[in-house]
Amino acid sequence: MLITGPRGTKDILPDASGNWQYIEKTVRDICRLYLYKEIRTPVFEHTELFLRGIGETTDIVEKEMYTFSDRGERSLTLRPENTAAVVRSFLENKLYADTLLNKLFYIGPMFRYDRPQAGRYRQFHQFGVEALGSKGPAIDAEIIMLAVQLLRTLGLDDLKLYLNSVGCPQCRPVYREKLQNFLREKTSNLCSDCQSRFERNPMRVLDCKKEKCTEQTQGAPHIVDCLCDECSTHFDQLKSLLTLAGVDFVLNPRLVRGLDYYTKTAFEIQYAPLGAQSAVCGGGRYDGLVAECGGQSTPGIGFAIGIERILLALEKQNLLPVISNAIDVYVAPMGIDMQGMAFKLLCKLRENGITAEMDFMEKGIKWQMKQANKYPAKFVAIIGEEEAAKEKVMLKNMLSGVQELVSINEVQQKIQLDMEA
RNA sequence: GUGGCUGUGGUGAAGCGGUCAACACGGCGGAUUGUGGUUCCGUUAUUCGAGGGUUCGAUCCCCUUCAGCCACCCCA
């Protein structure tokens, strides 16, 4: 039996890597436009970072992390997300000393021990953005616009932007208690998951998709009605900024993020045709995270986009660019004796920036012509005994079928002339 | 982690107890040994995800296992 790749991992094969490069390039272009700079952090961190950053009772930490001890008995974890690591790096490298506002992005693999499904892998890739330093709503709006513009640039519409505010340490406990009071006598009617959520994280009950739970939560108090003045003003300002920017959004009072560090703004962008994996982008504000990681209290906001899911969406909509294998010249030696001359020509063409290929399989002219046609090649430079004797090449234009005998030095000129035309 | 469906060549797939394991694409060879895209011909699965069992006989039935997909959970 062959050794297979681990469950939930996927090879990005030659035919698909072009699609990844296309997305990565689009991401980088947009980030340049918004002046977000790339940060690259390690794929593993001290386990402690995620316990503190993401929250010990979150599903990610409780059951989805790849945690192991290294040979020095350190507990390490393959990053399940990258915000905590960016914050760690921000503090460790004192990025706050360089500028008041740090605008960063990352793109790379993340790891979660989940049950695999289409659009859900154990090693998956996220593009994410983090802005550290500003507490005002304008940066929230910018971040959301970046996500929206990226998805639009890729050609995706039919996207829904859901928005909510989850409050801050001032107002959230007040809301939490209100919600618990509302749910208290209904707990017996909730699903078993929600019964345990009632104590631990009552806000997640609102997020439950089970019909009986949704029924019970009809008329539940909304957090947006319980926000403190600061959070409420922030939320109102964000909404008006987004309206000014011309983006549609849907207020979703039930939207709760799964990571503990979120405060105030929470948002999610969904692409409905992906079914259960429709959440294509998720993010929000995390004003408490930097302090939680041991730094000076610094506000922050960010989001992450799942690249596999974007790819699925683009495939579904037929929005992926066609990647061409076209080449300028195929050099075809007729027989092994001509190989040296062919190779010399090949090298010369490439030195001059001409996309060229030759036969490495030592096949006949017929096979080589077929190959040339497959790429397709604009020209084939045929080198037979007769041509070789004269230090010349039979240059065939594959489109017109016209061929002429030219000297080795002329090949390049002929091709460049054609390329300009 | 729970439940369901699926697993046949490089790919897309028929077959569902005894077949030579269809067909299509692709690959390779030829017709056309100094010339491609069309056409035609030939060839391409000691084997049906892996392991075990039932049976005279298993791709087909049963069990185990692995993997993928779908829903839940969670999330990007």
Image: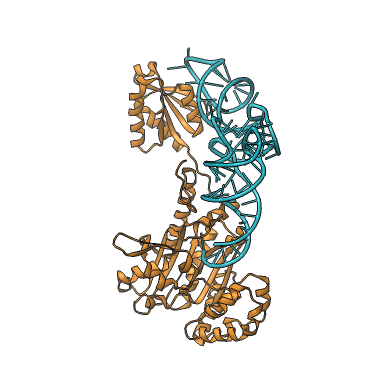
Chain colours: A orange, B cyan
In the image shown, does A288 or B48 lie closer to the viewer? B48
Query: Residue B9 in the image: x percent, y percent?
Result: 55, 35
Depth check, front residue: B17 or A107:
B17
Please indicate whether residue A338 sits to the left or right of residue A194 in the image: left
Residue A50 coordinates in the image, percent (x, y): 41, 69
User: Residue B44 falls in which quadrant of the image?
Assistant: top right
Q: Where is A56 relative to B67, above or below? A: below
Could you say where residue A152 lies in the image, as x and y percent from the top left? 55, 60
**Residue at position x 37%, y 27% from top?**
A410
Quadrant location of residue B7? top right
Q: Is residue B60 above or below residue A48?
A: above
As rendered, which of A339 and A81 lies closer to the eye? Answer: A81
Image point (57%, 58%), residue name: A156
Give the total number of marks visible in the rendering.
0
In the rendered view, tell whether residue A122 sits above or below residue A296. Answer: above
Q: Nearer the viewer, residue A186 or A409?
A: A186
| Residue A308 visible to the viewer | yes
Q: Is residue A318 visible?
A: no
Rendered location of residue B21, percent (x, y): 63, 30
